[in-house]
């Protein structure tokens, strides 16, 4: 029996300037550009095997068989790759995350980046990094940013081909650390896909989107100059602006827990006392604490004894998505 099989792995990423809201939901064309850092060691490894004995796609994630909407999302993504290859073969997908589910670390970014690489390699579809980033974006917006390595910018654009992510500094450019303070393991009540669709119902979204080029420029400048103070101010402002939109959407989305807010306040105090640390929060309660090189240990010590922090996970800057075997 002929088989077409490949394995790929990808890091998750943390956005410094956030993606929230699309101008095209189906193509996941974002309302604004975003900037992120790949997270080394927090990622997904995925094997895709196209087989002629399968009648439908099957997928397991961390040993659990996918059904319903989760399987459909994978299947629809594979359809894009099948169309490129002129193939109709169904596939068996096996995916593993090296961080626990419900740890509040976005798995869709690394999952759809790894799936895109594995599926294209398995069917011998040769794509550039830019084309792979566009493909990954169709599965999950933030996955576009997990294709290139290091510090990455995803461009907002009006067409599929123009909205891609590219690296603007390699992983070893600046040894920032992301300490993820897990304050809740509960699954979020409103997933990001649903949340993006509500963004435009907030009167603040237009202002947030209009100001995005300024924030992107400041953030990029801060990363390129390794200027932690400038990075901290813009990253916290951007996270606050996204949450302001979330909280004023109809219906409103409240992702923070009391510990989230307590940490935000503490982190600002720690920074005022000279520690290089800032916060950023995605669509959940957990707090990503970005630490300047050399300040990771003191922050880690404080987080591990912080009331309400269940666990702390650590990641440095990570590389691009890559083929493991294929
Ligand atoms: C708050 O990429 O998870 O983490 O495209 O629907 O899969 P989908 O959404 P997703 O959205 C991420 C939102 C965010 C901010 C960010 O990572 O930029």
Image: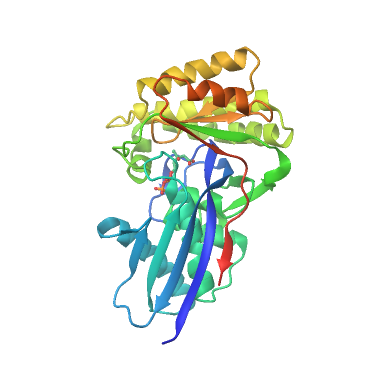
Position of 38 with respect to 284 (left or right) is right
Q: How is the image coloured?
A: rainbow
* Position of residue 233 measured from the top left corner of the image (x, y, whole percent): 60, 23
Residue 139 against residue 257 in the figure, above or below:
below
Q: Residue at x 70, y 34 (%)?
A: 221
Residue 277 against residue 196 in the figure, above or below:
above
For the image, the number of numbered tags is: 0
Residue 82 image-quadrant placement: bottom left
Residue 32 against residue 83 in the figure, above or below:
above
In terms of image quarters, where does ligand 1 lie?
Answer: top left
Q: Residue at x 71, y 28 (%)?
A: 227
Q: Residue at x 53, y 44 (%)?
A: 13
Asked if residue 101 shows in the view, the reply is yes
Q: Choose between 289 and 63: the one closer to the eye.
A: 63
Asked if residue 207 shows in the view, the reply is no
Q: Choose between 251 and 15: the one closer to the eye.
A: 15
* Position of residue 235 measured from the top left corner of the image (x, y, whole percent): 56, 29
- Hey, which residue is sitting farthest left in the picture? 68
Q: Quadrant of the C terminus?
A: bottom right
* Position of residue 313 measured from the top left corner of the image (x, y, whole percent): 50, 36
Position of 322 with respect to 88 (left or right) is right
- Hey, which residue is sitting farthest right in the picture? 225
Q: Quadrant of the N terminus?
A: bottom left
Q: Residue at x 40, y 39 (%)?
A: 103
Residue 49 image-quadrant placement: bottom left
Residue 61 image-quadrant placement: bottom left
Q: Choose between 278 and 96: the one closer to the eye.
A: 96
């Amino acid at each position: 029996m002929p088989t077409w099989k490949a394995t790929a792995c990808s890091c998750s990423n943390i956005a410094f300037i956030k993606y929230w809201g699309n101008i095209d939901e189906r193509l996941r064309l974002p309302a604004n550009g975003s900037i992120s850092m790949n997270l080394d060691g927090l990622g997904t490894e995925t094997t895709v095997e196209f087989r002629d004995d399968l009648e439908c796609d099957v997928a397991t994630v961390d040993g659990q068989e996918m059904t319903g909407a989760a399987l459909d999302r994978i299947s629809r993504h594979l359809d894009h790759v099948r169309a490129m290859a002129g193939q109709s073969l169904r596939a068996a997908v096996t995916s593993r995350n090296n961080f626990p589910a419900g740890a509040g670390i976005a798995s869709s970014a690394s999952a759809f980046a790894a799936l895109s690489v594995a599926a294209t390699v398995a069917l011998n579809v040769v794509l550039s990094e830019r084309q792979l980033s566009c493909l990954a974006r169709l599965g999950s917006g933030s996955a576009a940013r997990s294709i290139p390595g290091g510090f990455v910018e995803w461009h907002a654009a009006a067409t599929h081909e123009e909205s891609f992510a590219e690296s603007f500094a390699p992983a070893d450019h600046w040894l920032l650390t992301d300490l993820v303070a897990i304050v809740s393991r509960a699954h979020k009540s409103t997933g990001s896909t649903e949340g993006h669709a509500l963004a435009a119902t907030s009167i603040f979204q237009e202002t947030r989107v209009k100001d995005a080029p300024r924030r992107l420029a400041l953030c990029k400048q801060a990363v390129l100059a390794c200027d932690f103070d400038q990075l901290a101010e813009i990253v916290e402002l951007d996270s606050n602006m996204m949450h302001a939109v979330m909280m004023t959407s109809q219906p409103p989305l409240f992702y923070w827990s009391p510990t989230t807010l307590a940490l935000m306040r503490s982190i600002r105090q720690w920074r005022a006392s000279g520690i290089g640390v800032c916060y950023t929060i995605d669509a959940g309660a957990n707090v990503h604490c970005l630490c300047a090189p050399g300040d990771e240990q003191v922050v880690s010590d404080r987080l591990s004894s912080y009331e309400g922090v269940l666990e702390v996970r650590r990641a440095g800057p990570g590389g691009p998505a890559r083929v493991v075997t294929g």
